[in-house]
Amino acid sequence: MKALQYRTIGAAPEVVTVPDPEPGPGQVLLKVTAAGVCHSDIAVMSWPAEGFPYELPLTLGHEGVGTVAALGAGVSGLAEGEAVAVYGPWGCGTCAKCAEGKENYCLRADALGIRPPGLGAPGSMAEYLLVDDPRHLVPLDGLDPVAAVPLTDAGLTPYHAIKRALPRLVPGSTAVVIGAGGLGHVAIQLLRALTPARVVALDVSEDKLRLAREVGAHETVLSDAGAAAAVRDLTGGLGAEAVFDFVGVEPTVAVAAAVAAVEGEISLVGIGGAALPVGFGRLPFEVSVSSPYWGSRGELVEVLALARSGALSVHTETFTLDEAPLAYERLHAGTINGRAVILPGA
């Protein structure tokens, strides 16, 4: 089969031919219908050789949907041809967090060497994907694969962050979304669907601010040196009850700190690597800061249900598997508006 692999440190990913996988006991083989392109992949491909955490070559793609192609021995409850989404953050399945469905916070994954597809294990940017356990599959129930595949990360990750902040997002409150790209434009829709808060979106790109308005942002602000003052102005000097930074670099983290309200919440979702100092006098009183990761299996079910209700509409651009390296080039250049999706069967 064809697969998109990161093969050499510092080099671009390549489309190669690899052996078709076969499901072992308890495993499920999917014929991939759609795979999502994510900035996390670019982060992986930017790491230096020293300390690189995964074995190469690595088939990319941690967002995947497909149809069941074959079942390993002992697997029940699934039928060949069934359309499913893949829950990406695989865990041990037995620790206290996994028992709650929070495999994103598995307490034993590192010790056991368990890796998500595309982030250590072979990923979804291939004609077939081997899933280690049927519990990681969620029925699509009629959702279009292209529209659904970004929801497995670009929908699930902001949903998890926003769900934690819901008690703060009461009538009259303000939520700030920093970065209106793949995750941010979904976050705006989630905030509009789940809360009565006023939504203010920040980005350095006028195109992405236009997208933010299209998907429901009440206000948009160019993310420049005057952004924090502009948000403070919009909130009458009080700041925002919830701030979601989907970039995570030094300038955006500084803005997040500058616009948070007393007793507000800052969620650092982006993996830009910046840190936010926390301590008395550094932030408004009782501001909480979190760095969430992905979401639970139950939350993925909820996100897909929201999509079926019409509350979410991910803006996508599609590429064939042979065009996947171009998709990464454009993502790195910032010219993907929304989310890029690879169609291995196209």
Image: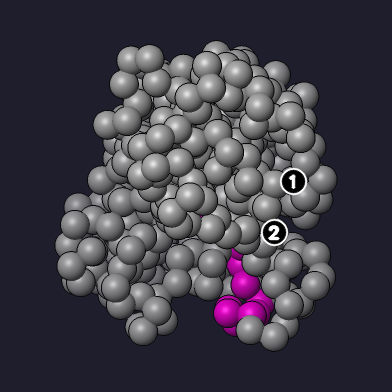
Q: Which x, y percent locates residue 261? A: 45, 33
Q: Are marks 1 and 2 in contact (CB under 8 Å)?
A: yes
Scheme of colours in the image: one colour
Residue beneath label 2, please? 42
The quarter of the picture where the N terminus appears is bottom right
For numbered disc 1, what is the local secondary structure? helix
Is residue 60 inside the magenta stretch? Answer: yes
Q: Amino acid at mark 1?
A: Leu
The answer, for residue 341, to whether it is visible in the render is no
Task: Identify the residue shown where x is 62% and y is 61%.
Answer: 273
Does residue 74 appear to the left or right of 33 in the view shown? left
Q: Which x, y percent locates residue 275? A: 57, 59
> Which residue appears farthest toward the front when viewing the image?
281
Give whichever of 203, 174 is nearer the camera: 174
**What span is colored magenta in the figure?**
52-64
Task: Identify the residue shown where x is 19% and y is 57%.
Answer: 100
